[in-house]
Amino acid sequence: MEDMVAVRKKKKLTFQWVFYTYSFLMLLFYIAYVFITNDRFSKADQRMSGNPLSGAELENIRQSWMWTQIFENLFLVLFLLMCLVCIFIISYKKDRNLYYQFMMTNSSLILGIIALSFVFNQTTMLPIGNLLQIIFIPIITFAIAYFYLLWVLRKKRGPS
């Protein structure tokens, strides 16, 4: 019996570590996305002010756009992978604790990114839409996962 408790405690700590690492990477990708996008916008603003850009500066703007896309895609891929792993584990193990941890982590992450977006909107020249566009697909996916996992967990209990 004590071995079962130790195994559950170890499993819970492992999942907590995974969720902390996931949250850290998601925030890191988001902040990198914001800083690179801001740099790209400031260079484009320089172009709009009438100062001609050299070929090297245009190449630099193109590279900034490419890195913006890379970080946006990393953010999305990491979110989708975590979603799929959690959906798979929760669906087959019917683990309510993992479900709540998954929901709380992603809810906190989405709300944190929304709050950071408003802060970055005030401190950078980026419009709020550009700051929030990175979480549109994750919000929709998160809502679908929420209802699917709720259905799976209720199905486990049987008819009420």
Image (cartoon, rainbow, N blue to C red):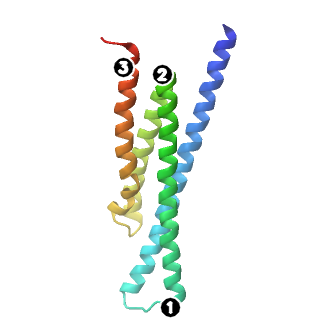
Residue type pointed to by label 3: Arg
Residue 121 position, x and y percent, is 37, 62
Q: Is residue 30 left or right of residue 133?
A: right
Residue for point 50% across, 24% down: 92
> Mark 1 and mark 2: span between their CA atoms?
59 Å
Few, some or many C-alpha atoms within 10 Å of disc 3 (few <14, some 14-19, many ≥20)? Answer: few
Residue mark closest to the camera, 3 vs 1: 3
Decide which of tag 1 and tag 2 comes sooner along the chain.
1
Q: Secondary structure at mark 3?
A: helix
The residue at 39%/80% (across/down) is 45
Real-space Cα separation, disc 3 to disc 1, in angstroms: 61 Å
Q: Amino acid at mark 1?
A: Ser
Q: Which residue is mark 2?
A: 94
Q: Residue furthest right?
A: 3
64 in relation to 94, above or below: below
Q: Which numbered disc flags the more N-terminal residue, 3 or 1?
A: 1
Quarter assignment of residue 21: top right
Circles 1 and 2, Cβ within 8 Å, touching? The answer is no
The residue under label 1 is 54
